[in-house]
Image (spheres, rainbow, N blue to C red):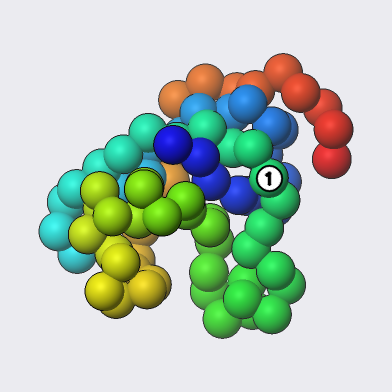
Amino acid sequence: MVAAYPSYPFGTRVRVTNRKNGRAVVVRINDRGPAKPSRKEGVIIDLSPAAAARLGMIKDGRSPVRVEVLEWGDDDRQ
């Protein structure tokens, strides 16, 4: 499963935890995002549909999450 984050190096593995229900998933950062307008609204990460489904976020669309770095990627493309 993958996600987009504005600044973490590509390949970084993070654990994303849905703070509403406690479900967690590990994703790999493979893209940049969310877009600046969404970040201004407090969106900090864009998840793939599979990751969002595992976290129980499909219906809500957005949910408060915690993001923890498990392993830094070594791809410095930014």
Residue drawn at the location 38% of the way across and 72% of the way down: 62
Looking at this view, is 76 or 51 the one in front? 51
Residue closest to the far front: 50
Q: Secondary structure at mark 1?
A: strand
Question: Can you see residue 1?
Answer: yes
Q: Is residue 55 left or right of residue 14?
A: left
* Residue 52 position in % (x across, y down): 35, 55
Instruction: Name the residue beneath numbered marker 1.
Output: 31
The kind of residue tagged 1 is Asp
Residue closest to the far left: 21
- Quarter of the picture containing the C terminus is top right
Residue drawn at the location 47% of the way across and 51% of the way down: 48
30 lies above or below 71: below
Q: Quadrant of residue 60?
A: bottom left
Q: Is residue 74 left or right of residue 46?
A: right
1 lies above or below 60: above
* Residue 61 position in % (x across, y down): 37, 73
Residue closest to the far right: 77
Residue drawn at the location 68% of the way across and 45% of the way down: 31
Q: Quadrant of residue 74?
A: top right
Looking at this view, is 67 or 5 the one in front? 5
Question: Can you see residue 66?
Answer: no
